[in-house]
Image (tube, rainbow, N blue to C red):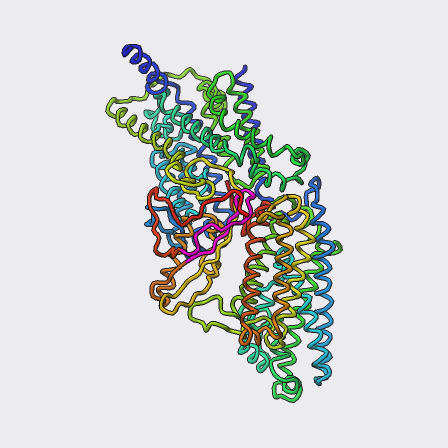
Amino acid sequence: MMAIDNDYWQHIKNKYVTQPVHIAPLAVLRMVFGAVMFISTARFMANGWVKDFFITPTFHFPFYGFEWVRPFPPTGMYVLYGVMLLAALCVAIGLFYRVAVATFFLCFCYAELIDKTYYLNHYYLVSIITFLLMLTPAHRYFSLDVLRKPALKVTQVPAWTIYIFQLQLCIVYFFAGLSKVNYDWLIAAMPLKIWLHAKEQTPYLGILLRQSWSPWVFSWAGALFDLSIAFLLMGRRTRKVGYAMVVIFHVLTALLFQIGMFPYIMMAVTIIFFPASFHWQLIRLLSGGRGLPEQQVVLPWPPHKAKAMYGLLVLYFSWQLFMPVRFLLYPGKLLWTEEGYRFSWRVMLMEKGGTTFFYIKNPATGRQFEINNARLLTPYQERMMETQPDMMLQYAHLLHDTYAKKGIPDPQVSVASYVSLNGSGSRLYIDSTVNLATQRESWFGHKTWILPFKKNQP
Amino acid sequence: MQQRNILVAVLAGCIGLGVLISCGKSGDKDTTPVNNSKTDSVLANFGANIIVPAYQQLATTTAAMDAAVTTFTATPNAGNLTSLQTAFKNAYVAYESCTQFEFGPAVDQSLVTTIVNVFPTDTNTIKNNMTTGNFTIDGLSNFKAQGFPSLDYILYGANSATVVANFSTAANAANAQKYLAAVSASLKAKAAAVLNAWLPTGGNYLATFSAATGVDAGSSLSILVNAFVYDYDVILKNYKLGIPIGKYGASTIPQDPAKVEGFYGGLSLTLLHAELQSMQRVYTGAFEKKVVASSAQSNGGSLNDAIKNQLATVITKVNAIPETLSGSITTNAAAVNDAYTEATKLVVLVKVDMSSALGVKISFSDDDGD
């Protein structure tokens, strides 16, 4: 038995990890991803979001453990985005790739960590794809680095450099699909029932959306797509159909929802599933059709490096598998409490709206007054805070500190918060008797002051 | 061969995507209606039958007010002052039916609460302007000294005899007349410009408004819901009730009756009532059908009923406040607090339940979601 197992593992390891494969897919991914990041960063700047997101707000909602990440002064923020833009370009054309991809990663993560208001799953995806790109020699083929230093050129790289991206995308789609297997999505067709209904005036597509059954069709199709697409893309025979579905699915979501670059990023990175021959043809086309027989050069891959890399990848992917299921550590309904919600590939699952009335009480005088949130937060921050308990807690602490400075000794902060989730109708969200100023954030600790979600509230 | 086919397909896809990226997301700044897009019949009707008439009324009443200003400044006497005060009150009431539409033309022409209805008004600047005659009516430093609240102070800030004297026998009467005329003319011009921008014979924003379907940022429904919620939550609940009865602020005295809207003329409750009635019209005209179609529930009943009932309750509570609002704040705070409490409940219903049922995001700008 042991022997068979060993052979089997040897075979798997060889096929997916060590075996030299052509580098073309990696080079194409680098170019396409770099180009999309360039467009995405340019769009971010052109929309004026550097100012709106990082310069205008006086307060930010940092991620737990990253409170030290603060926005730079205005010029610094523009420089950060300028550097990011340049780095994306360098990644695309493969110029000073190692430095460029690391720079992009650091700049991008820094910006994302400043304020969780702006968290989007596809920003998270961008950071991890960039992280994985940092580990690979994606610049050693069809790049300016190779033109600059021909000795860099290799044609064969170990298989893992391609498969890590495929595995990552499988995780993304599969967990996105799993998160749709629930009552709200499949049986109640929520939140698509609300969202598609609102889109009935869309030209052409509207005819479909006006049908009463369309939310269910879209919900089930979406869940099945997410669950199966990784397998379709991996299968040699189903790949083309799979990619066609990727395009149709993401173009549809781009038409129906305001989700920015997400569909384009997904359509760009999923080309990594195409075989090396396809990518090689593409590069040949890009280089003017010269199909010179190229000399095989295998990337030197010393064992000590390999060991460290495999260790890192095992750790990384274990973490990737843990993050989406960590919500099981918390009691209560995930969509309601949002404990363990981020970094889990949960997209488009909620129509959630809320409002908060924050109160400050002076314990010395007993005088209580209400807070106008707009004085301290931007409308965007306020909207995100009003449905997310961890942000409410951060805001409560901000209020405590702000009014302590204004001379109220240890002000008490409470909130009357109403939230509606997937058409549930508004209901009280937070225990309004709790002084949030004394509550603390923690790793994996349940926030006991979130009231449980009651399905059928009278 | 097969490889080549895939290549062509992918390249074609990429070009298509490029086109999508370049055209797709610029939508919300685009003001020209797309030919093949269907209009939202509910919003089209609402724009034509509620919004445009509201601005028509404002344009008419501000023009009448401006004429009364001309008469009064030519012949400052008690009779002409009374006519002017009536004309002013009519215009102010008409304005309350427009505050739910502070987007598009209203923003372009600065006919918004933060410019033409900032209260309490800046009496020092007004006095200074009326004495020196030296001012820029729409200047940055003057925004708290113009609009309806400044007229409220100018026309009601003292007894009739004194007001008439300010414009006739006072040393700087000519400058006072000049300032009054400028404030009034500015309101008249803004109202006329906004009306023109909406009219099909003018800027035809009505067509843009009817054509921007959907619920994304930039869609008319999203803009209207947001404007409605803002007007209700921030302007009505916070500024008109909450601040004067001392719900906000740590160090201010608990109550500040001078911070009500229409303080000098004692117009607060009239204006509040006009605004609430307009909100009822907006709800029935623009949102009711959509809320009913969503079949959203609230505490076991329909959300539509809940919102309409709560709106009616708020109106009842406001009507129960004895005149004047500022007087009641000092002598009958319970009645005002009652109204505030009911107003707060309605905030939850429109901001959370209604927006959720319609799939509209509050404070939505052109940011991305996922």
Q: Position of residue B16 (x, y in %)?
A: 58, 31
Q: Position of residue A246 (x, y in %)?
A: 53, 28
Q: Position of residue B159 (x, y in %)?
A: 63, 84
Q: Which residues are magenta?
A: A414-433
x 53%, y 27%: residue: A224
Is A162 part of what is drawn in magenta? no
- Along the line of sight, which residue is nearer the eye, A101 or A16? A16
Answer above or below: position of B322 versus A125: below
x 56%, y 19%: residue: B5
- Along the line of sight, which residue is nearer the eye, A438 or A137? A438
Answer above or below: position of B204 versus B370: below
Is A423 part of what is drawn in magenta? yes
Answer above or below: position of B297 versus B170: above
Is residue B23 in view from this perspective? no
- Along the line of sight, which residue is nearer the eye, B50 or B278? B278
Answer above or below: position of A455 versus A166: below
x 54%, y 14%: residue: B1
Relative to A123, A218 lies left or right: right
**Residue farthest toward the right in the current orientation of the protein:** B201
Relative to A395, B84 lies left or right: right
Q: Position of residue B170 (x, y in %)?
A: 62, 88
Is residue A14 in view from this perspective? yes
Q: Can you tell which quarter of the image residue B65 is in?
A: bottom right
Relative to B336, A212 lies left or right: right
- Along the line of sight, which residue is nearer the eye, A408 or A366? A366
Q: Quadrant location of the N terminus of chain A? A: top left
**Residue farthest toward the left in the current orientation of the protein:** A304
